[in-house]
Image (spheres, rainbow, N blue to C red):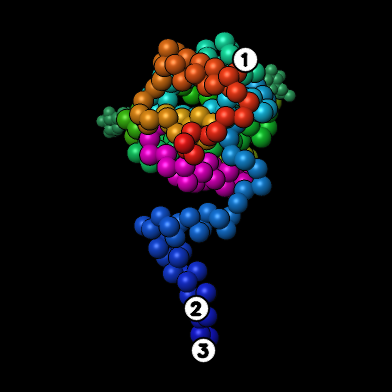
Amino acid sequence: MEILKPKQGFLILSSLLFVCNLSVWTIHVQGSIPARFDGFVYKDDLPHADTIMIEAFFDPVCPDSRDAWPPLKQVLEDYGPRLSLIVHPFALPFHDNAFVTSRALHIVNKLNASATYHLLELFFKHQEKFYNQQTHNMSRASVVDHIVRFVTKAVGDDLLSAVESGFNDRNSDFATRVSFKYGCSRGVIGTPYFIVNGFPLPNAGSAVDYKGWRSIIDPLINKQRQSGDEIPYFFL
Ligand SMILES: *[C@@H]1O[C@H](CO)[C@@H](O)[C@H](O)[C@H]1NC(C)=O
Ligand SMILES: *[C@@H]1O[C@H](CO)[C@@H](O)[C@H](O)[C@H]1NC(C)=O
């Protein structure tokens, strides 16, 4: 008979408690650090020293995420390289097709990264096709089939079989789980959820309008102008 060493016992216990205990869950996440930072970089604009970094957590089938996108997109156009955006898909458990549509984003991002935001916009535009009610009578397999065809419209017919096999590839499943876990690790409990320069915006779960974004960003740009070596506010 093999006796568990305390550490092994702890590991097994941790995996049993994983679903209900956040601190143990944190240990689990640390054990599986992904090779790349999660999410989709908008227009491939990576941040530089003065960039204001926005992270947005969107569920592709969430109406509030859909409504949050146009004003944010407008702000990104207007401020140009001052802003950088990473979208993390975050599949809310009460949306039946949130995980599978999030997975579709990961699949497409791998096939053609510049089509990812195009697909996100298509999901937002035709979101009602994938609501719980509308897919209530469909089998899991026919929902996936439906999504494969939908996605192919965004990336081109020649990628049909690549998209199809993407849904059989464990890596796309893993990537979608990583997105979910990353959101959990940042305390995301609803979408849309925004983090600006590493700090969460209040009012999680509601869209920020164009004026709202300006009132967040303008003061940050002014502060950057005023001083290069200000003391971070959390030390004051
Ligand atoms: C990738 O997607 C972009 C935007 O949808 C498209 O213009 C481009 O032709 C695609 N590239 C390939 C290699 O399919
Ligand atoms: C689901 O199937 C039932 C029984 O066949 C039908 O009455 C109902 O209208 C269907 N619902 C949808 C949303 O298609």
Say if 168 sits above or below 122 in the image: below
User: Label 3's element?
Assistant: loop
Q: Earlier in the sequence, mark 2 or mark 1?
A: 2
Do labels 2 and 3 touch, CB within 8 Å? Answer: no
Say if 7 sits above or below 34 in the image: below
Disc 3 to disc 1, C-alpha distance: 65 Å
Q: Position of residue 27 (x, y in %)?
A: 50, 59
Q: Which residue is mark 2?
A: 6
Q: Nearer the viewer, residue 165 or 187?
A: 187
Q: Nearer the viewer, residue 158 or 61?
A: 61
Q: Amino acid at mark 2?
A: Pro
Q: Earlier in the sequence, mark 2 or mark 3?
A: 3
Disc 2 to disc 1, C-alpha distance: 54 Å
Q: How many marks?
A: 3
For residue 115, side relative to residue 7 (left or right): right
Q: Amino acid at mark 3?
A: Met
Disc 2 to disc 3, C-alpha distance: 16 Å
**Quarter of the figure with residue 106:** top right
Q: Which residues are magenta?
A: 168-191
Q: Earlier in the sequence, mark 3 or mark 1?
A: 3
